[in-house]
């Protein structure tokens, strides 16, 4: 049969529902707990932060949830995204594998993140919210939400971790172009920020501090709510448009993956590509392996502990049942900023605990090597986060070669690296390090948790 290079769906073929894996999980996840009362959080606890529609999606047991037409219309600016057969990359690897990738870098912000930014902005707009706050590390989430808020006339205040604010000026320029207001965090706009600045005027900031500032700014103004780009159930739900499309595209290609791979920060792009395939495993007799790939320097899935922990450093969020390195864990400064998170989404954590998915950890230099190999064969320069998925693809291909077994691989190309070229420069100059984390370090960090056993 002729090799298919690319499978494109028409607008009319774009899925009109997200897939909610909570309907099919053999063991439901344990409930998030209120940080003070330690009781399961209810909708009212979350209402100051999120619109009710998103809170209902967070706990929904419905298998499919309709994508509002207004959201579909905006998705169609770049969706359906292409499924591409990486024929040149296959040749470069010289292994008995077929490799497909779902190209999420085609969105205006350059990653999968607008898939949830757009519905989040939409549901806030429907509830009359005039302003959103959020945090951003390297700037990918902030830029996706800035892009999305523009469609609904919502003002956006982004707290950007100071060190990135200084080092990654172009993400900030993108947010400004899309009309968002960006400040370096810690900032003078919040009590939390002022307190840290008075104690440490030169603080480089952290995601934990930026989250505290964004939450404080949201709860202290009735017309303002807060938005998060990963980890939570509703965020993972919105990303399943990726895998829903991919399943249709494999049908057209008359093929099916043996392995589905996504890089892992909080779990959103991984869930997006893989949950519809997990559903096929659970309900339709399929048996694809599902692999989440994290940095070796931030190994919550492969070496973390499954327990209740806070989502942020300061301890303002609910306690979440998840694989974690401890909320005080400070990941080394690798370039894949989007993967430097201490925990993992609760659904993904439960699936891993139940062995319905696998996890793998790869070091930074192997990732950049894989990213460059991919760029030189397929053309697209992947985001540093995405190179983790590609490194795993190469490991799978090498294994297939050793075992003389053929294999069909699907991975999610979560974003392009065109705003991250300084990281590639550093790699070419030989300036990148592989960080290793000792077992004692992990144990000490996890032991410091005030643990509520999960
Ligand atoms: C943010 C980001 C990630 C990591 O976040 P997840 O929620 O785990 O998907 C991965 N790739 C890219 C390109 C990103 O921007």
Image (spheres, rainbow, N blue to C red):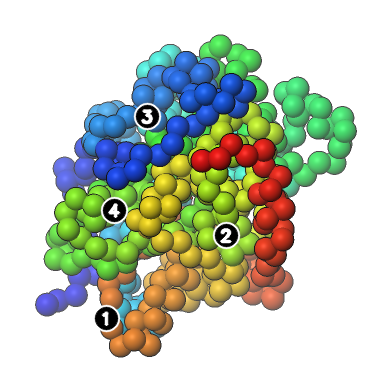
User: What residue do we see at 87% from left, 30% from top?
Assistant: 198
For marks 1 and 4, give the one nearer the viewer.
4
Residue 2 visible in the current orientation: yes
Where is 403 relative to 38, above or below? below
Residue 149 image point, x, y percent: 46, 29
Does the beta carbon of the residue at mark 3 sit less than 8 Å from ligand 1? no
What label does residue 59 carry, if any? 3
- Verify CB contact (< 8 Å) between mark 3 and mark 4: no
Determine the residue located farthest toward the top in the rendered image: 222
The residue that label 1 is drawn on is 406
Cα gap from disc 2 to disc 1, whole angstroms: 30 Å
State left or right for residue 423 relative to residue 252: right
Q: Earlier in the sequence, mark 1 or mark 4?
A: 4
What label does residue 278 carry, if any? 4
State left or right for residue 51 relative to residue 35: left
Q: Earlier in the sequence, mark 2 or mark 3?
A: 3
Determine the residue located farthest toward the left in the rendered image: 1
Where is 49 relative to 64, above or below? above
Cα gap from disc 3 to disc 1, whole angstroms: 40 Å
For marks 2 and 3, give the one nearer the viewer.
2
Among the 4 quarters of the image, the one containing residue 184 = top right
Give the quarter of the figure containing the N terminus: bottom left
Crowding near the residue tagged with mark 1, few <14, some 14–19, many ≥20 C-alpha atoms within 10 Å: some
User: What residue do we see at 55% from left, 44% from top?
Assistant: 307
The residue that label 2 is drawn on is 303
Residue 234 image point, x, y percent: 39, 34
Q: Earlier in the sequence, mark 3 or mark 1?
A: 3
């Amino acid at each position: 049969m002729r090799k298919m290079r690319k499978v494109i769906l028409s607008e009319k073929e774009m899925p009109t529902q997200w897939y909610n894996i909570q309907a099919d999980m053999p063991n439901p996840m344990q409930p998030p707990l209120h940080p003070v009362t330690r009781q399961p959080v209810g909708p009212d606890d979350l209402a100051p932060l999120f619109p009710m529609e998103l809170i209902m999606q967070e706990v929904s047991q419905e298998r499919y949830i309709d994508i509002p037409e207004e959201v579909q219309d905006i998705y169609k600016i770049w969706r359906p995204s292409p499924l591409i057969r990486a024929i040149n990359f296959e040749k470069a690897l010289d292994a008995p594998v077929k490799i497909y990738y779902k190209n999420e870098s085609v969105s205006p912000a350059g990653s999968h993140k607008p898939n949830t930014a757009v519905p989040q902005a939409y549901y806030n707009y429907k509830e009359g919210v005039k302003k959103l706050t959020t945090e951003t590390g390297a700037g990918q989430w902030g830029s996706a939400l800035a892009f999305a808020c523009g469609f609904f006339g919502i003002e956006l205040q982004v707290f950007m971790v100071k060190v990135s604010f200084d080092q990654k000026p172009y993400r900030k320029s993108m947010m400004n172009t899309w009309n968002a207001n960006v400040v370096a965090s810690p900032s003078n706009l919040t009590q939390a920020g002022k307190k840290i600045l008075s104690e440490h005027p030169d603080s480089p900031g952290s995601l934990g501090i930026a989250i505290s500032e964004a939450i404080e700014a949201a709860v202290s103004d009735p017309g303002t709510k807060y938005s998060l780009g990963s980890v939570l159930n509703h965020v993972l739900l919105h990303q399943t448009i990726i895998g829903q499309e991919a399943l249709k595209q494999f049908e057209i290609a008359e093929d099916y993956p043996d392995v589905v791979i996504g890089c892992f920060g909080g779990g959103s792009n991984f869930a997006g590509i893989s949950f519809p395939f997990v559903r096929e495993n659970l309900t339709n007799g399929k048996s694809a392996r599902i692999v989440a790939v994290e940095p070796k320097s931030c190994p919550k899935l492969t070496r973390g502990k499954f327990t209740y922990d806070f989502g942020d450093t300061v301890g303002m969020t609910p306690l979440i049942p998840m694989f974690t390195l401890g909320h005080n864990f400070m990941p080394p400064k690798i370039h894949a900023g989007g993967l430097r998170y201490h925990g993992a989404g609760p659904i993904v954590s439960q699936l891993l605990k139940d062995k319905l998915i696998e996890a793998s950890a790869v070091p930074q230099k192997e990732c950049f090597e894989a990213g460059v190999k991919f760029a030189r064969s397929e053309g697209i320069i992947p985001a540093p986060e995405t190179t983790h998925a590609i490194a795993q693809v190469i490991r799978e291909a090498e294994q297939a070669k050793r075992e003389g077994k053929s294999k069909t691989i699907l991975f999610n190309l979560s974003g392009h690296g065109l705003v991250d070229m300084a990281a590639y420069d550093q790699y070419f100059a030989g300036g990148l390090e592989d960080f290793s984390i000792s077992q004692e370090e992990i144990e000490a960090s996890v032991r410091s948790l005030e643990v509520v056993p999960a």
